[in-house]
Amino acid sequence: MTTDVTGAIEVEAVGIAKRFGAFTALDGVSARFRPARVHALLGENGAGKSTLVKCLLGYYRADEGSILVEGREASIERPADADALGLGMVYQHFTLVPSMTVAENLVMARADVPAVIDWSRERTALAAFMQTMPFQVPLDIPVGRLAAGERQKTEIVKQLYLRRRFLVLDEPTSVLTPAEAEQMLGLVRELTHSGAITTVIITHKLREVAMFVDDVTVLRRGRMAGSGEARSLSAAAMTAMMIGEPQVPANPERRGVPAQAPVLEITGLRTPGIGGRAGLGIDKLIVRGREIVGIAGVSGNGQAGLVEVLAGQRAATDGEMLVDGEPYDATRGAAQARHVRVLPEEPLRNGCVPRMTVTDNLNFRTFDDGGGRFWLDARAMGQRARRMIDMFGIRAPSPLAPIGVLSGGNVQRCVLARELDGEVRLLVVANPCFGLDVKAVADIRARIMAARNAGTAVLLISEDLDEILELADRILVMREGRIVHETPGAGADAQAIGAHMVGQH
Amino acid sequence: MTAIELQQAASLPAPARDADRFYPLRRAAEAVVFPLAALVIALALFSVFLLALGKSPGTFFWLVWRGAFASAFSLQNTLQRAAPLLLTSLCVAIPAQLGLVIIGGEGAVLMGGLAAVVATYPLQTAPGWLLDGLMAIAGCAGGGAWIGLTGLLRTKRGINETIVSLVLYYIALAVFNHLVEGVLRDPASLNKPSTYAIPPQAHIPSLFGTELHPGLPVGILACIAAWVLITRTTTGFAARMTGGNMRAAQLQGLPVQRLMIGACVLGGACAGLAGMIEIAAVQDRANSSLAAGYGFTGILIAFLARHNSLAIMPMAVLLGGVGAAGGLLQRRLDLPDASVLVLQGLIFVCILASDTMYGRIGWFQPARGRA
């Protein structure tokens, strides 16, 4: 085939259609990815971005349409066909083996791994290869010990090692600090403009598009919504194409100032470290009423542990938690008595039972009236669920559908509806908008701000620094289980926060 | 020049309908159609097996019908076989609500039966109803403790409950044999080592001049009670939450470990009760006849019923019937005994395979593709 071509290649999708049962994921989409340029593929969740690239990469077979590589029609029926043509992808969820070293991962990914590997020769070759890379990755460290940013770089290095000439990056910066993200995207752009690869970035972040992207392609509900050169498109124009509405939802309004008395007060909280990762060591953490405290940090620096302790999913070895001055042990009784609510990250995985109905899931907090009931009250549960569905605009095929069939935004709305129902003194939220589309993000941030304005103390733990900058009254930075930096939310410096996140301040 | 081909898509699909009134109906239909289709496919495959042996499938199914359901005698035989299976299936289906796969129900049957026999020994002259009550309590306690131990090891030590329950079955069998052939052995039982018999007044008579013993109504009541517990009570709701997603249950502060152990104890108690009824109504003494595989057939039935306590009832009758027809098949078709096992195995595999079909067929899905 075309394996002798060197450097970036052009890929073009012509009239691609893909249906899953009655659902049309792609409806006659045509897009041309010109060589040696950085392309952004924009669109809301479910717009068809992933489906389109999966068709290009042979994971799906398109029902209609064709794919042109370097102007010639290519038959891509399997991922192996895409490999042979030099088409590759870096997934949002990493595909490296954590227990193997970077070198082992690279060699193993090759299509032609020999039965017996001559490691000294491979290592020399790898070292030489690494010299040609714009960024370095340590070869002899197990991937599991690398930080998220390093792993992302390793994924890209792996694709280049496999001689890919057309590379799709699926939300590559979602787990990186702003500094890491800028560095990584800068390197990708450099690499692309040098003519080595053609890059397609699937993203939600318009700021990155403005800074690093040459061409933009926007999908909406499985159709082409528009395309053009990035420098000639404003953020508002791109958003309009994505959501089909002229104006961007306004930032939620902040009303009132934080109360004086603390609602949540954590002192000397400790948990043991797990698998080489530091445990929690929080000396003092206070959240007041009508205040959003944002905790920023690179993923894996103890944020998940803090949420688990507050949610009762993990026990602390030491320390004291007070809510409104009363001891708090995160049991069901204490959470209900003190009006504490936790919105975990990945709500479908952490806060819902996918195979139970929307109605059931909306009643998780209240089905037993705080432990006093024996018989389920199906009628009250149904009424409560319908009220929440209406209030939060949850779109579900039926209140009796399993919650697992809902889209991510609607699952998050369900969990939010459930946890914000009734009096809420303390709300703990982790990455509430991860993987949601623009409209759902705006909606959910507005709900969190509304809870704050109503007097709730909010602890917002997020890997999305933009989100924290938008919502928080006060920002804390967490690294290796400790709080290492504090700054007021108003006028906070993203670069300084980023530096504290990675420990280079 | 701002060269842009801004192809604003002219007409987007109309907003999808938010509600599908027939959705619950579609789901119910899905839950009935798939197992039935799997059953039909299993029977078709078994017909191929019969044809390969040179037997007529038509004759075979006719004989199963005759041997299992056609006459009062065969129907009684079928129901009698189904009775203990109802209870042993619950030993799988109840823990399954919490995501636990328990396959050691046979061990609970043995321990329950043994405990029931031993409970009568100090009270040889007590009235029958008292003895039966004591036997039932002892049977439930023996079986409940046995499977409860599995739950305890799972929750406190994180040991796989499937393996533990299986290994505990072997231990139960060894303990059972050791006692029945040792200290509890009635010297008069020469060919078949057995315990001393329970006092005659403790024997539970058959119902209304039939062959049926009270194990059948007890099993049916237990299945209905389990269904009510699981679907209608807050405890059952909490159990289903835990089984569906333990992290979500923990997030709501539910006592996850207690629920798991409780479900194991309850399931084990059901299986232990099956052992007690076998002793009190059929065997009168504990011997190797108690290890007849009820616990293992219960696994099959619970999976066939997809752990739905109400669906266990027809499935237990179905498999009881296949067992009841075994003798007739052997005599009339000259089929080896194991061919019934082939049929059971085919049904099992087909039902398990049908599990992967849920959510794949458009008609059963909501009228709307995706939110």
Image: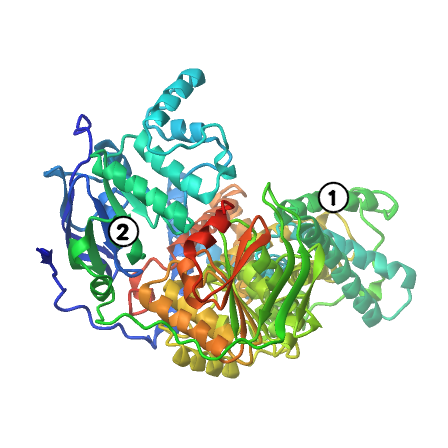
Q: Quadrant of residue A456?
A: bottom right
Specify the quadrant that holds the N terminus of chain B.
bottom left
Q: Quadrant of residue A231?
A: bottom left
The residue pinned by badge 1 equals B171
Q: Nearer the viewer, mark 2 or mark 1?
A: 2
Tally of marks = 2
Q: Residues within 10 Å of mark 1 (few under 14, many from 20)?
A: few
Chain letter belonging to callout 2: A
Task: Answer above or below: position of B279 versus B287.
Answer: below
What is the x, y in percent for residue B15? 24, 73
Instruction: State left or right for residue A210 relative to residue B270.
Output: left
Q: Which residue is mark 2?
A: A211
Picture residue at 68% right of the left edge, 43% below the top: B167
| Screen quadrant of the C terminus of chain B | bottom left
On screen, residue A396 versus residue A189, left or right, reads right
Q: Position of residue A313 (x, y in %)?
A: 61, 59
- Amino acid type assigned to the residue bearing label 1 in the image: Ile
**Three-letter amino acid code at disc 2?**
Met
Query: Is the image coloured rainbow, by chain, by secondary structure, or in one colour?
Result: rainbow
Would residue B192 be visible to someone looking at this image?
Answer: no
